[in-house]
Image: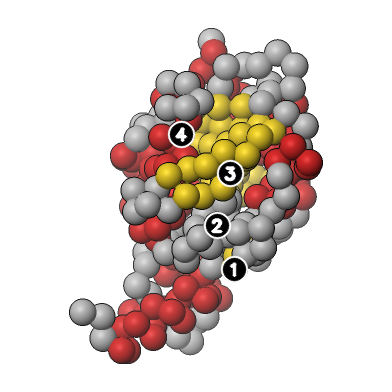
Amino acid sequence: MVSPIGGFLGRVQRRLTYFPDRQPVPDAATVLPGARDVLLDTADRLRLGAWLVAPAGPGRGVAVLVAPGNAGSRLGRVPLARALAGAGLTVLLIDYRGYGGNPGSPTQSGLARDVRAAREYLVGSAGFTPDRIVYLGESLGAAVVTELAVAHPPAGLVLRSPFVDLAAVGRHHYPVLPVRALLRERYPVADLIGAVTVPTVVIYGTADSVVPPGQSRTVATRAGGPLRVVAVEGADHNDPVLLDGAPVVGAVVDLADRIRG
Protein backbone atom coordinates (compact mmCIF):
# COMPACT_ATOMS: atom_id res chain seq x y z
CA MET A 1 0.00 0.00 0.00
CA VAL A 2 1.26 3.49 -0.90
CA SER A 3 1.24 5.92 2.01
CA PRO A 4 -0.50 9.29 1.54
CA ILE A 5 2.87 11.03 1.80
CA GLY A 6 4.46 8.65 -0.67
CA GLY A 7 1.59 9.13 -3.11
CA PHE A 8 1.84 12.91 -2.78
CA LEU A 9 5.59 12.86 -3.42
CA GLY A 10 5.08 10.64 -6.43
CA ARG A 11 2.57 13.06 -7.93
CA VAL A 12 4.83 16.04 -7.29
CA GLN A 13 7.78 14.25 -8.87
CA ARG A 14 5.81 13.37 -11.98
CA ARG A 15 4.66 16.97 -12.37
CA LEU A 16 8.29 18.09 -12.24
CA THR A 17 9.50 15.38 -14.62
CA TYR A 18 6.89 15.01 -17.36
CA PHE A 19 5.46 17.84 -19.46
CA PRO A 20 3.18 16.12 -21.97
CA ASP A 21 1.20 17.76 -24.70
CA ARG A 22 -1.92 15.68 -24.23
CA GLN A 23 -3.75 16.95 -27.31
CA PRO A 24 -4.44 14.36 -30.04
CA VAL A 25 -2.17 14.67 -33.05
CA PRO A 26 -3.30 14.79 -36.70
CA ASP A 27 -3.27 11.77 -38.97
CA ALA A 28 0.29 10.93 -39.93
CA ALA A 29 -0.18 11.35 -43.68
CA THR A 30 -1.38 14.94 -43.25
CA VAL A 31 1.94 16.07 -41.77
CA LEU A 32 4.51 13.61 -43.13
CA PRO A 33 4.61 12.22 -46.65
CA GLY A 34 5.08 8.47 -46.53
CA ALA A 35 3.89 8.20 -42.92
CA ARG A 36 1.04 6.16 -41.55
CA ASP A 37 -0.68 5.77 -38.21
CA VAL A 38 0.07 2.60 -36.24
CA LEU A 39 -0.95 1.28 -32.84
CA LEU A 40 1.39 -0.11 -30.20
CA ASP A 41 0.04 -2.58 -27.65
CA THR A 42 1.74 -2.40 -24.26
CA ALA A 43 2.11 -5.21 -21.73
CA ASP A 44 -0.38 -3.46 -19.44
CA ARG A 45 -2.99 -3.28 -22.20
CA LEU A 46 -2.74 0.28 -23.40
CA ARG A 47 -2.98 1.07 -27.10
CA LEU A 48 -0.66 3.91 -28.04
CA GLY A 49 -0.72 5.88 -31.25
CA ALA A 50 2.53 6.21 -33.21
CA TRP A 51 3.69 7.12 -36.70
CA LEU A 52 5.68 4.83 -38.98
CA VAL A 53 7.53 6.84 -41.61
CA ALA A 54 8.76 5.14 -44.76
CA PRO A 55 12.14 6.11 -46.24
CA ALA A 56 12.14 8.65 -49.01
CA GLY A 57 13.67 7.07 -52.09
CA PRO A 58 15.91 4.00 -51.82
CA GLY A 59 15.86 2.71 -48.26
CA ARG A 60 18.83 1.60 -46.19
CA GLY A 61 16.92 -1.31 -44.66
CA VAL A 62 17.37 0.13 -41.17
CA ALA A 63 14.67 1.32 -38.75
CA VAL A 64 15.08 4.03 -36.13
CA LEU A 65 13.04 3.91 -32.93
CA VAL A 66 12.81 7.51 -31.71
CA ALA A 67 12.22 7.90 -27.97
CA PRO A 68 11.39 11.55 -27.29
CA GLY A 69 12.20 13.73 -24.33
CA ASN A 70 9.82 14.68 -21.56
CA ALA A 71 7.82 17.41 -23.30
CA GLY A 72 5.50 17.95 -26.24
CA SER A 73 4.30 15.21 -28.57
CA ARG A 74 5.42 13.49 -31.75
CA LEU A 75 4.08 16.40 -33.75
CA GLY A 76 7.13 18.36 -32.61
CA ARG A 77 9.45 15.63 -33.93
CA VAL A 78 8.21 15.88 -37.52
CA PRO A 79 11.38 17.68 -38.76
CA LEU A 80 13.56 14.94 -37.25
CA ALA A 81 11.48 12.15 -38.79
CA ARG A 82 11.48 13.93 -42.14
CA ALA A 83 15.27 14.29 -42.10
CA LEU A 84 15.86 10.66 -41.13
CA ALA A 85 13.39 9.39 -43.73
CA GLY A 86 15.05 11.64 -46.28
CA ALA A 87 18.30 9.82 -45.53
CA GLY A 88 16.68 6.48 -46.41
CA LEU A 89 15.70 5.32 -42.93
CA THR A 90 12.41 3.93 -41.68
CA VAL A 91 11.34 5.88 -38.61
CA LEU A 92 9.01 4.88 -35.77
CA LEU A 93 7.98 8.10 -34.07
CA ILE A 94 6.27 7.33 -30.77
CA ASP A 95 4.49 9.12 -27.98
CA TYR A 96 4.53 7.77 -24.45
CA ARG A 97 1.38 7.14 -22.44
CA GLY A 98 -0.30 10.43 -21.63
CA TYR A 99 1.31 12.20 -24.60
CA GLY A 100 -0.19 13.08 -27.97
CA GLY A 101 -3.69 11.90 -27.12
CA ASN A 102 -2.52 8.54 -25.77
CA PRO A 103 -4.22 7.02 -22.71
CA GLY A 104 -2.55 6.66 -19.34
CA SER A 105 -0.11 8.76 -17.33
CA PRO A 106 3.70 8.71 -17.66
CA THR A 107 5.86 6.86 -15.14
CA GLN A 108 9.29 5.26 -15.41
CA SER A 109 7.85 1.75 -15.53
CA GLY A 110 5.17 2.87 -17.97
CA LEU A 111 7.64 4.42 -20.40
CA ALA A 112 9.68 1.21 -20.26
CA ARG A 113 6.60 -0.72 -21.36
CA ASP A 114 5.91 1.83 -24.08
CA VAL A 115 9.29 1.48 -25.78
CA ARG A 116 9.11 -2.29 -25.49
CA ALA A 117 5.83 -2.15 -27.37
CA ALA A 118 7.51 0.02 -30.00
CA ARG A 119 10.37 -2.43 -30.41
CA GLU A 120 7.94 -5.35 -30.62
CA TYR A 121 6.11 -3.56 -33.40
CA LEU A 122 9.33 -3.09 -35.37
CA VAL A 123 10.41 -6.72 -35.05
CA GLY A 124 6.86 -7.97 -35.59
CA SER A 125 4.52 -6.12 -37.91
CA ALA A 126 7.25 -3.98 -39.50
CA GLY A 127 9.53 -6.97 -40.13
CA PHE A 128 12.87 -5.62 -38.94
CA THR A 129 15.37 -7.88 -37.20
CA PRO A 130 17.11 -6.46 -34.09
CA ASP A 131 20.38 -6.15 -36.01
CA ARG A 132 18.67 -3.62 -38.33
CA ILE A 133 17.29 -1.33 -35.62
CA VAL A 134 18.84 1.79 -34.09
CA TYR A 135 17.51 3.36 -30.90
CA LEU A 136 17.59 7.16 -30.75
CA GLY A 137 16.75 8.74 -27.40
CA GLU A 138 16.67 12.43 -26.61
CA SER A 139 17.22 13.58 -23.02
CA LEU A 140 14.70 11.59 -20.94
CA GLY A 141 14.30 9.33 -23.97
CA ALA A 142 18.01 8.55 -23.76
CA ALA A 143 17.34 7.04 -20.34
CA VAL A 144 14.38 5.09 -21.66
CA VAL A 145 16.25 3.52 -24.59
CA THR A 146 19.35 2.78 -22.52
CA GLU A 147 17.27 0.56 -20.27
CA LEU A 148 15.67 -1.00 -23.35
CA ALA A 149 19.10 -1.62 -24.90
CA VAL A 150 20.22 -3.58 -21.84
CA ALA A 151 17.25 -5.92 -22.14
CA HIS A 152 16.93 -5.94 -25.95
CA PRO A 153 20.16 -4.86 -27.67
CA PRO A 154 19.74 -2.96 -30.93
CA ALA A 155 22.30 -2.64 -33.71
CA GLY A 156 23.28 0.79 -32.45
CA LEU A 157 22.37 3.40 -29.86
CA VAL A 158 22.29 7.21 -30.15
CA LEU A 159 21.88 9.19 -26.92
CA ARG A 160 21.21 12.90 -27.29
CA SER A 161 21.83 14.94 -24.12
CA PRO A 162 21.81 11.99 -21.69
CA PHE A 163 21.94 12.64 -17.95
CA VAL A 164 23.64 10.58 -15.24
CA ASP A 165 20.33 9.87 -13.50
CA LEU A 166 17.17 11.78 -12.68
CA ALA A 167 18.42 12.81 -9.24
CA ALA A 168 21.57 14.35 -10.71
CA VAL A 169 19.48 16.56 -12.99
CA GLY A 170 17.16 17.40 -10.10
CA ARG A 171 20.04 18.50 -7.90
CA HIS A 172 21.24 20.80 -10.67
CA HIS A 173 17.87 22.56 -10.91
CA TYR A 174 16.78 22.33 -7.25
CA PRO A 175 20.03 22.51 -5.26
CA VAL A 176 18.36 23.27 -1.92
CA LEU A 177 16.06 20.22 -1.99
CA PRO A 178 16.97 16.66 -0.89
CA VAL A 179 16.19 15.49 -4.40
CA ARG A 180 17.50 11.95 -4.21
CA ALA A 181 15.51 11.25 -1.04
CA LEU A 182 12.33 12.64 -2.59
CA LEU A 183 12.48 10.85 -5.93
CA ARG A 184 10.49 7.70 -6.56
CA GLU A 185 11.88 7.24 -10.09
CA ARG A 186 15.55 6.91 -10.97
CA TYR A 187 16.38 6.55 -14.68
CA PRO A 188 19.97 5.48 -13.87
CA VAL A 189 21.60 5.98 -17.29
CA ALA A 190 25.22 6.04 -16.15
CA ASP A 191 24.76 2.88 -14.10
CA LEU A 192 23.21 0.98 -17.01
CA ILE A 193 25.19 2.11 -20.04
CA GLY A 194 28.17 -0.12 -19.25
CA ALA A 195 26.01 -3.15 -19.94
CA VAL A 196 25.29 -1.91 -23.46
CA THR A 197 27.97 -3.27 -25.79
CA VAL A 198 26.63 -2.11 -29.17
CA PRO A 199 28.09 0.92 -31.00
CA THR A 200 26.98 4.02 -29.13
CA VAL A 201 26.98 7.73 -29.97
CA VAL A 202 26.62 10.40 -27.29
CA ILE A 203 25.64 13.85 -28.56
CA TYR A 204 25.42 16.91 -26.35
CA GLY A 205 25.52 20.69 -26.48
CA THR A 206 28.34 22.45 -24.68
CA ALA A 207 25.93 25.18 -23.51
CA ASP A 208 23.14 22.86 -22.36
CA SER A 209 21.23 24.57 -19.56
CA VAL A 210 18.89 21.63 -18.87
CA VAL A 211 21.27 18.65 -18.73
CA PRO A 212 24.74 19.81 -17.68
CA PRO A 213 27.27 18.84 -20.37
CA GLY A 214 29.43 17.13 -17.76
CA GLN A 215 26.68 14.62 -17.14
CA SER A 216 26.54 13.63 -20.80
CA ARG A 217 30.32 13.26 -20.79
CA THR A 218 30.09 11.03 -17.71
CA VAL A 219 27.60 8.78 -19.48
CA ALA A 220 29.99 8.56 -22.42
CA THR A 221 32.93 7.52 -20.24
CA ARG A 222 30.90 4.58 -18.90
CA ALA A 223 29.69 3.24 -22.24
CA GLY A 224 30.34 -0.46 -22.67
CA GLY A 225 30.52 -0.56 -26.46
CA PRO A 226 32.40 1.22 -29.25
CA LEU A 227 31.86 4.90 -28.61
CA ARG A 228 31.68 8.13 -30.55
CA VAL A 229 31.15 11.47 -28.79
CA VAL A 230 29.79 14.52 -30.62
CA ALA A 231 30.05 17.82 -28.75
CA VAL A 232 28.06 20.58 -30.43
CA GLU A 233 29.77 23.83 -29.50
CA GLY A 234 27.51 26.52 -28.06
CA ALA A 235 24.31 24.48 -28.39
CA ASP A 236 21.63 24.58 -25.70
CA HIS A 237 19.28 21.72 -24.91
CA ASN A 238 16.42 22.66 -27.25
CA ASP A 239 18.33 24.37 -30.02
CA PRO A 240 17.31 23.13 -33.49
CA VAL A 241 20.78 21.74 -34.17
CA LEU A 242 20.22 19.22 -31.36
CA LEU A 243 16.63 18.45 -32.32
CA ASP A 244 16.97 17.61 -36.00
CA GLY A 245 20.29 19.08 -37.10
CA ALA A 246 23.21 17.52 -38.91
CA PRO A 247 24.98 16.19 -35.78
CA VAL A 248 21.97 14.06 -34.82
CA VAL A 249 20.91 12.95 -38.28
CA GLY A 250 24.50 12.31 -39.31
CA ALA A 251 25.17 10.15 -36.26
CA VAL A 252 22.17 7.96 -37.02
CA VAL A 253 23.08 7.65 -40.71
CA ASP A 254 26.66 6.74 -39.85
CA LEU A 255 25.43 3.95 -37.58
CA ALA A 256 23.05 2.76 -40.27
CA ASP A 257 25.90 2.58 -42.75
CA ARG A 258 27.97 0.53 -40.31
CA ILE A 259 25.04 -1.84 -39.94
CA ARG A 260 24.73 -2.23 -43.69
CA GLY A 261 28.47 -2.68 -44.19
10 Å crowding of disc 2: few (<14), some (14-19), many (20+): many
The answer to which of marks 1 and 4 sits earlier in the sequence is 1
Instruction: Give residue 227's position: percent from left, percent from top.
Output: 48, 33
Q: Nearer the viewer, mark 2 or mark 1?
A: 2
Relative placement, left or right, of 110 versus 209 is left
Residue 19's label in the rendered image is: 1
Q: Which residue shows up at 47% across the image and 21% down it?
A: 127
Q: Distance between the residues labelled 1 and 4?
A: 26 Å
- Circle 4: element type: helix
Which callout, 3 or 1, points at the residue further toward the start of the chain? 1
Residue type, numbered disc 2:
Asn
The residue wearing badge 3 is 50
Contact (Cβ within 8 Å) of mark 3 with mark 4: yes
Is there a contact, CB below 8 Å, between mark 1 and mark 4?
no
Tell me the element at label 1: strand
Q: Which mark is residue 102?
A: 2
State if disc 4 and disc 2 touch (CB < 8 Å). no
Q: Can residue 29 be seen in this view?
A: yes
- Cα separation between marks 3 and 4: 10 Å
Q: Find the distance from the CA under tag 2 to the CA under tag 1.
A: 14 Å
The residue sitting at the left extreme is: 1
Q: Distance between the residues labelled 2 and 3?
A: 9 Å
Q: Which of 38 and 185 is in front in this view?
A: 38
- Residue 121 image label: 4
Q: Where is residue 124 in the image (x, y as percent from the top left)?
A: 42, 27
User: In the rendered view, would you say 257 is above or below 149?
Assistant: above
Please tell me whether mark 3 or mark 1 is closer to you in this view.
3
**Quarter-of-image position of residue 89:** top right
> Which residue is depicted at the point 70% across and 13% down?
58
Identity, as a three-letter code, of the amino acid under mark 3: Ala
In the displayed structure, 232 sits above or below 155; it is: below
Of the pair 193 and 8, the residue shown nearer to us:
8
